Image: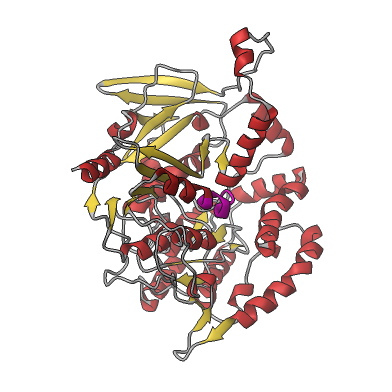
Amino acid sequence: MFLKLSFRTFLFAMPVLFAGCASVQKHNEKRLKPIPVAQLQEDIDYVQNKLIKLHPGSDLYITKEQLAFKFDSIRKVVNKPMTSNEFYTVISPVVASVRQGHMAMMPMSVKLTKEQQKKYKQAGDGPLSQFKFEWENNKLYILKNNSNVKEIKEGTEVLSIKDRKPQEIYAKYKASVTSDGYNTTFLWKYFNKRFTTFLTEEIGFNDSLSFTLKYKDSVYDKMICRKKKDKKENKPLTEKQEERLVTKDIIKKKNKNKRIFGYDEKTKEFSKSLRFIGKDTTVAYLKINDFVDGNFKKAYKVIFDSIKKSGSKTLVMDLRDNPGGRMSEILNLYSYLTPEDFIMTEPAVVTSKTSLWKLGLFPRVPKLAYPFIGAFYPVYMGVSYFKVKKGDDGKYYYHLSASKTQKHNPNHFNGKVYVLINGGSFSASCIISSALKANKDITFVGEETGGDFNGTVAGIMPVLKLPNSEIQWRLGLMHIKPVKQTDVKGHGIYPDKEIIQTIEDKVNKKDPELEWILNDIYK
């Protein structure tokens, strides 16, 4: 845990602390400056060599010969100087052809100085951040409108933003996006998350944007400007408002719940939440947005204690749009869903005894931070070196906690379980779903997951920086495979009952997947 926290601290905090105006200006100038052909060729060699040396699954869905051919092909294409982001559109599709969803490149984005960040913050939310978008059937819709232009209804189609059609953005960047394996359900989910990033790369930062919108048969234009946060006025409280004031103890308990169950201040949602639904409220509905936030041990203890006290015979576990997270958390959760001790994954495959050393950490932090990193890095190197063992098959294996026997929880749930999944169910969500799928009494509802049934390459995921173009590149170093496998190669966990929620369903606050489950329970 210490290593994990230290890594995150230096990864995210240190660049912010030490970044200066000069470095920002230098970064932005380099972003627009054409890079010589020889240097771009060096970056191609760099990516190819790192893939071979560090990534244990580069040939899972593409042969070595096919991948080598792709690298040779772009070497021929790169025959003139290119900017970093022009080069991105050439190199990223080759990386995406490996078909590993955790591995991704991102365009070299514009950086803002502290003064610019302060200015934009004071000016309010940008035009794009005031909407929640949804990409479906090659069209972009507004799912939630937080702007001051209240006549824009949910479900409105976005035809263009600043004269740029969403389909143009998708066409340009879709080759840079991939899922685990051959499934397609994850692709539009990923693009939906990255749409504003890709669009900003094309049009830059704006204080106002012109939108061309379509609602039913009506097409119209709207200008969306930055929106300042509402200032709370210190008006005298009415008698009723005073009665509603919570005590310090209640506030303390509320904050404690936020820490335990994980709370997102932006979405106003808990990472893990439990409620009881159905005709007699005896169906337990557990929504897990991610396996990242909150104190999962305390959270699941409270959750399954509550389920037991309620006498619920049915549990609906919602993993839709859960991108994954901690392996330790899904082990803890699974212990409540099985009556037996278990092993969830095989030992993780790595490329060598030293491949886990390639954190790519030092190039991403200022030199002033090196002494702090150096204090723990040798310890990490020693531990990882001795935990990697060479197998009889010649491959190298790292023994995760999930590849060792885990105890089931005495307070495990014994009733009927339904699991809701979709293309946004990824990574750790798929690992636990693969384990649950082996139980024939568990029913999966929704659509094929975005992650592969048979595992993923993740674990430790350094973010490397290409030497000359400075494109950031994240790749996994561990091939993690669940003990339970399927003969269907390169696809996710399939639902027993396929139901796909549409834009219309979401706008009308309908949940056809959950409705089907409730009907199935009571019939």
Residue situated furthest left in the rendering: 523
How many numbered circles does the render carry? 0
**Residue at image coords 50%, 60%:** 332
Q: Is residue 431 within the magenta segment?
A: no
Q: Position of residue 425 (x, y in %)?
A: 39, 53
Q: Is residue 432 above or below residue 163?
A: below
Q: Is residue 294 within the magenta segment?
A: yes
Q: Nearer the viewer, residue 121 or 25?
A: 121
Can residue 87 be seen here?
A: no
Q: Nearer the viewer, residue 317 or 451?
A: 317
Q: Position of residue 456 (x, y in %)?
A: 43, 66
Q: How is the image coloured?
A: secondary structure
The magenta stretch spans which residues? 293-301
- Specify the principal SS of the magenta part: helix
- Taking the image as shown, residue 410 lies to the left or right of residue 214, namely right
Which corner quadrant holds the C terminus?
top left
Can residue 138 be seen here?
A: yes
Q: Nearer the viewer, residue 231 or 262?
A: 262
**Residue at image coords 68%, 75%:** 381
Q: Position of residue 128 (x, y in %)?
A: 50, 32
Q: Position of residue 125 (x, y in %)?
A: 57, 28
Q: Nearer the viewer, residue 265 or 173?
A: 265
